[in-house]
Amino acid sequence: MLTLHTKISQADAIAAQLVLPYELREKCRLRATLDNGEDVAVFTVRGTVLRDGDLLTGEDQRVVRVVAAPEPTYKVTCADAHALLRCAFHLGNRHTQAQVGDGFLRIRADAVLKEMLLGLGATVAEESAAFEPESGAYGGGHGHHHDHGHGPLAPIPLRQKIHRPGDAK
């Protein structure tokens, strides 16, 4: 079985593709099947999220491209930016992963969230799409960041001091 454990920034040849929904791309240990039918084991640093287009390799130096699989999602749009911002706030308040696009949000399909968004005046369209949510405040920035070197797949933040307005400097 092919074992993948290192992310690289470029390759001359791609041996196969690993097509996965987001839920599986955020696992650090995974057994899957490549598009050519070969079984593969993926071992990544805890906290790593594989993004569409990432390149992985292992001991035998074959390179596999990660592909975001289409999955059930909602595309959320609003009449104006203020209404869309309100929707983003309420989704964040519920710790919901969201993909931020140009004039839209995309979330995993969830009937309860759909009703909330409709109640906020949003248009919620069901679609099958690749889901690439934001990585979060401590996840290294925008969700489409790619590593440009060879080494660990993702840094894991150590303790972060929380600064409060009343703290001494």
Image: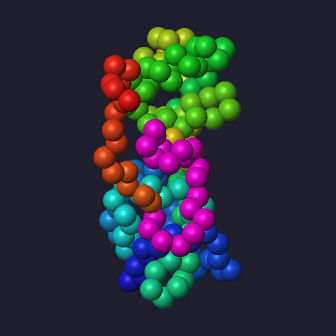
Asked if residue 146 lies in the magenta stretch, the reply is yes
For image coordinates 48% across by 44% down, the residue present is 135
| Numbered label tally | 0
Measured as percent of width and height from the top left, residue 14 is found at 62, 77
Measured as percent of width and height from the top left, residue 167 is found at 33, 25
For image coordinates 37% across by 51% down, the residue present is 157
- Give the main secondary structure, helix, strand or loop, of the magenta stretch: loop
Where residue 116 sits, quadrant-wise, is top left
Asked if residue 51 lies in the magenta stretch, the reply is no
For image coordinates 66% across by 14% down, the residue present is 79
* Picture layout, residue 29 above or below residue 138: below
Of 100 and 152, which appears nearest the observer? 152
Where residue 66 sits, quadrant-wise, is bottom right
Position of 57 with respect to 103 (left or right) is left
Q: Quadrant of the C terminus?
A: top left
Measured as percent of width and height from the top left, residue 161 is found at 33, 38
Position of 19 with respect to 148 (left or right) is left
Q: Quadrant of the N terminus?
A: bottom left
**Residue stretch in magenta:** 135-153
Of 60 and 73, which appears nearest the observer? 60
Measured as percent of width and height from the top left, residue 52 is found at 57, 57
Residue 153 visible in the displayed image: yes
Where residue 3 sits, quadrant-wise, is bottom left
